[in-house]
Image (spheres, rainbow, N blue to C red):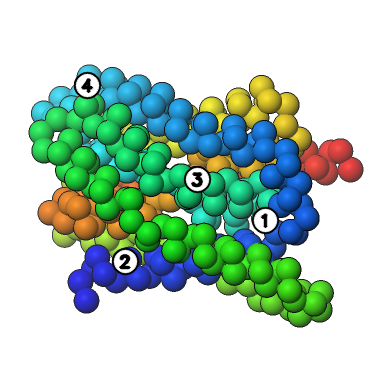
């Protein structure tokens, strides 16, 4: 009944709730259209691998300039574990809120999750040389736990169940279920943020470290903003429609920080302070997602 077990179980249930709701909202025919025109999906998957390889070395270079004895390896470890994760389930909630292209977003979540047994160890191995001390060894050993079925079971199966319900339910029943699931999924997304915060802030309140808090906030902000900016730039280069472009941008900037928190809790139980950048990133990516959603709404109102 330790905190690691509690975090894993809570995260599993909440992710399942959010993804079931996302699958429930996807028109099956629209999902088929996305599969027939997979440009956004392929671009999102390529960016999911390319952005960490571009952003993390840049952040590592900046941290080398600081007086930290290990070159910021602790903060880098947390950031690597975040950006190597699949697209966050919560991105589907923001896509619904901003009237983005939900089939594209669900496709990106599913595809990045299905490929995570390959992409996550690849990214961890490629970025481990940037770390010093025992962090590189810890990161290498952590890659083994990311190849299990935890992520697939908590993402793919609930989303598939939602798609199945959308396919077999009659419109009145589907509408009633949808009305209850959408606010429930938003609540689940908020509780996921609380679950991450409970581990990080507890150790910080017991032993305050203001400089670490500021450093975690700055590093998380740099990684988050660069990820969103690169996603938006790619959407412009590809000349995607506004809803699809919004979904691609959200997918590039929103990674599964809850899974990162679980990995840190289990792999580095003696370093709970590394949850601080995870918490900061989780909050910042939601703030950035809100900006993307607001921009899409403004554009839609101007066109209408």
- In depth, the one of 194 and 29 nearer the eye is 29
The reply to whether dot 1 and dot 4 touch (C-beta < 8 Å) is no
| Residue designated by label 4 | 64
| Residue designated by label 3 | 112
State left or right for residue 126 relative to residue 70: right
Mark 3 → mark 4, Cα distance in angstroms: 31 Å
Mark 3 → mark 2, Cα distance in angstroms: 22 Å
Q: Earlier in the sequence, mark 2 or mark 4?
A: 2
- Say if residue 194 shows up in the picture: no
Crowd tier of the residue under label 4, counting other residues whose Cα lies within 10 Å: few below 14, some 14–19, many 20 or above = some
Give the secondary structure at mark 3.
helix
Q: Position of residue 113 (x, y in %)?
A: 47, 50
Camera-side mark, 2 or 4: 2
Crowd tier of the residue under label 1, counting other residues whose Cα lies within 10 Å: few below 14, some 14–19, many 20 or above = some
- In depth, the one of 233 and 266 nearer the eye is 266
Crowd tier of the residue under label 2, counting other residues whose Cα lies within 10 Å: few below 14, some 14–19, many 20 or above = many
Query: Which of the labelled discs sits on residue 96, or is there none?
Result: 1
């Amino acid at each position: 009944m330790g905190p690691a077990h509690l975090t894993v179980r809570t995260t599993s249930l909440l992710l399942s709730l959010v993804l079931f709701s996302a699958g429930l909202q996807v028109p099956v025919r629209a999902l088929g259209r996305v599969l027939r025109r997979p440009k956004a999906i392929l671009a999102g998957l390529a960016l999911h691998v390319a952005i960490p390889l571009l952003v993390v070395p840049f952040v590592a270079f900046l941290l080398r300039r600081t007086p930290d004895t290990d070159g910021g390896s602790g903060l880098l470890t947390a950031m690597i574990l975040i950006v190597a994760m699949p697209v966050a389930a919560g991105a589907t909630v923001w896509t619904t809120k901003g009237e983005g292209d939900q089939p594209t977003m669900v496709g990106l979540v599913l595809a990045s999750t299905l490929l995570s047994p390959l992409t996550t160890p690849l990214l961890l191995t490629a970025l481990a040389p940037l770390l010093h001390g025992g962090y590189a060894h810890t990161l290498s050993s952590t890659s083994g736990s990311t190849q299990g079925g935890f992520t697939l079971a908590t993402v793919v199966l609930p989303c598939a169940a939602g798609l199945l319900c959308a396919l077999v339910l009659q419109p009145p029943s589907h509408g009633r279920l949808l009305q209850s699931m959408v606010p429930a999924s938003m609540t689940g997304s908020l509780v996921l943020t609380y679950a991450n915060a409970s581990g990080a802030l507890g150790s910080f309140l017991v032993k305050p470290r203001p400089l670490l808090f500021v450093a975690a906030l700055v590093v998380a902000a740099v990684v988050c903003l660069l990820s969103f900016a690169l996603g938006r730039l790619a959407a412009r280069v590809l000349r995607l429609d506004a809803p699809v472009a919004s979904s691609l941008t959200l997918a590039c900037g929103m990674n599964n920080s809850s899974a990162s928190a679980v990995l840190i809790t289990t792999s580095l139980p003696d370093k709970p302070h590394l949850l601080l950048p995870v918490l900061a990133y989780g909050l910042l990516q939601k703030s950035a997602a809100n900006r993307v959603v607001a921009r899409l709404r403004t554009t839609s109102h101007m066109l209408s």
